[in-house]
Image (cartoon, helix red, strand yellow):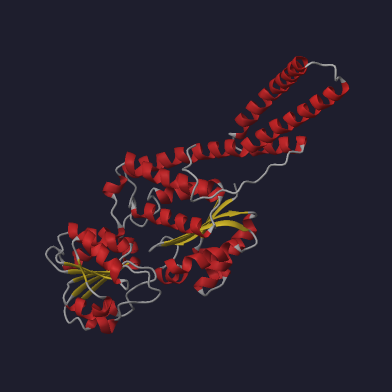
């Protein structure tokens, strides 16, 4: 399997470091290409959100791949591997599967139970599939993780108790400034987080709603969907003068709101910065009348107390991990069994060919009967070993039995290329 996850998140590092490691959407293809160009990395998917950066990889050697990935992350953060290592977490093989399933279920999120992560994980996998950096191993892992995430949200009420990052930030902000109901609000950014921000503001009673984006067409589409008003990005200073609440969630590599711009609005503002890297420059939160809530402040305020729904979700994940591993072990041994049967068929056909040359007087009926008898004997001889090796492969360490068969019979297992974008969902 050789699955490796290397990540950094709000649990292990501060926002300044996360900002340096984060990858904006347009930079993702180059980063993925760089990853699979490393000596020990065969496949790679990168998940970069407002509170985590994770690399899922299929690798040829644990230590070598860890050095490859760690070096890349250190280079992005402008530090050394030694300095970065304490902020990283690493999961390998079974632990990597478990981590992927917990992430998809929202169990590892800043706001436990939030469903946004499913879409973010799906998008990350989609980009890797388009770039050709996700192959058979990561296809199986991530398709199954997405299915597990959907199951957790369908069979538990974890998302009812859990909030989105947007709703959690808005609740925190309202605790300081009062309700947003009836107050004008602006969303900067027309991506998935921007859409969620508009929906959350509308449910909270904020009105009227404005949205702006560097791409005017995207802002107009989002405005139409959520009953908002699209405003040109060039008129951002004027828009700030007209609203009481601002949510910024762009993929900009640098700040879009600085102290001069926000201060020029000339009245109190509640500003929610949900971007990574941050959209709001240092110093904005110190302006008179400005209440700033960002990812760093939010991560400090949220409770991670487990409840009954979390335990139910953890139980689902545990069962799914075991089912996936059982299926994976069986899938791993299937090519070996097929190769063994193919080798047996080759031997039988070769012997039947020699028999035909030695005994040309045999009729077609005689040759057919001999062939049928030999095939039946071979199949009966192979039946019990192949059934048993499948059973043993489903147990921990079972891959050793398939390896033994390959060594004993000198079996060559072909490696098929799989198109992750075209392959179906994995069902163990």
Residue located at (53% from left, 74% from top): 79
Residue 72 appears at what percent x and percent y? Answer: 56, 67
Total numbered circles = 0
Foreground of the two, 313 or 2: 2
Residue farthest toward the right in the current orientation of the protein: 358
Residue located at (45% from left, 70% from top): 17
Residue 346 appears at what percent x and percent y? Answer: 75, 31
Q: Is residue 410 above or below residue 206?
A: above
Picture quarter containing residue 276? bottom left
Residue 155 appears at what percent x and percent y? Answer: 33, 39
Picture quarter containing residue 167? bottom left
Relative to residue 390, is residue 259 drawn left or right?
left
Q: Is residue 159 above or below residue 272?
A: above
Foreground of the two, 97 or 232: 232
**Can you see residue 287?**
no
**Can you see residue 301?**
yes
Residue located at (54% from left, 70% from top): 74
Relative to residue 212, is residue 70 drawn left or right?
right
Picture quarter containing residue 154? top left
Relative to residue 2, is residue 240 drawn left or right?
left
Residue 405 appears at what percent x and percent y? Answer: 72, 35
Q: Is residue 416 above or below residue 346?
A: below
Residue located at (45% from left, 37% from top): 319
């Amino acid at each position: 399997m050789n699955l490796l996850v290397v990540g950094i998140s709000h649990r292990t590092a501060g926002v300044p470091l996360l900002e340096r490691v984060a990858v904006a959407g347009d930079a993702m293809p180059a980063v993925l290409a760089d990853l699979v160009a490393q000596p020990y990395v065969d496949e790679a998917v990168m998940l970069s959100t407002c509170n985590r950066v994770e690399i899922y990889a299929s690798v040829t050697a644990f230590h070598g791949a860890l050095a490859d990935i760690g070096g890349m992350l250190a280079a992005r953060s402008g530090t050394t591997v030694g300095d970065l290592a304490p902020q990283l977490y690493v999961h390998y093989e079974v632990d990597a599967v478990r981590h992927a399933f917990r992430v998809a279920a929202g169990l590892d999120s800043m706001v436990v139970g939030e469903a946004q992560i499913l879409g973010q994980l799906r998008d990350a996998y989609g980009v890797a599939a388009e770039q050709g950096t996700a192959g058979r191993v990561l296809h199986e892992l991530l398709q199954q993780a997405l299915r597990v995430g959907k199951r957790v949200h369908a069979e538990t009420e974890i998302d009812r108790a859990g909030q989105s990052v947007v709703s959690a930030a808005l609740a925190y902000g309202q605790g300081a400034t009062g309700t947003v109901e009836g107050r004008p609000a602006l969303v900067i950014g027309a991506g998935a987080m921007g859409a969620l921000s508009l929906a959350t503001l509308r449910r909270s009673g904020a009105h009227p709603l404005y949205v702006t984006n560097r791409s005017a067409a995207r802002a107009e589409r989002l405005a139409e969907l959520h009953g908002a008003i699209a405003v040109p990005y060039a008129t951002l200073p004027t828009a700030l003068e007209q609203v009481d609440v601002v949510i910024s969630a762009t993929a900009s590599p640098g700040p879009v709101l600085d102290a001069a711009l926000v201060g020029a609005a000339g009245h109190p503002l509640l500003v929610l910065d949900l971007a990574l890297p941050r959209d709001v420059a240092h110093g904005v939160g110190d302006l008179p009348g400005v209440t700033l809530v960002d990812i760093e402040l939010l991560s400090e305020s949220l409770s991670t107390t487990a409840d009954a729904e979390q335990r139910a979700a953890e139980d689902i994940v545990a069962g799914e991990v075991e089912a996936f591993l059982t299926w994976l072990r069986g899938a791993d041994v299937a090519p070996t069994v097929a190769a063994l049967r193919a080798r047996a068929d080759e031997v039988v056909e070769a012997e039947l060919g020699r028999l035909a040359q030695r005994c040309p007087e045999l009729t077609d009926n005689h040759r057919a009967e001999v062939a049928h008898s030999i095939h039946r004997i071979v199949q009966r001889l192979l039946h019990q070993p192949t059934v048993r090796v499948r059973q043993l492969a489903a147990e921990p360490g079972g891959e050793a039995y398939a390896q033994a068969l390959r060594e004993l019979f000198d079996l060559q297992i072909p490696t098929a290329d799989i198109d992750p974008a075209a392959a179906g969902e994995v069902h163990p």
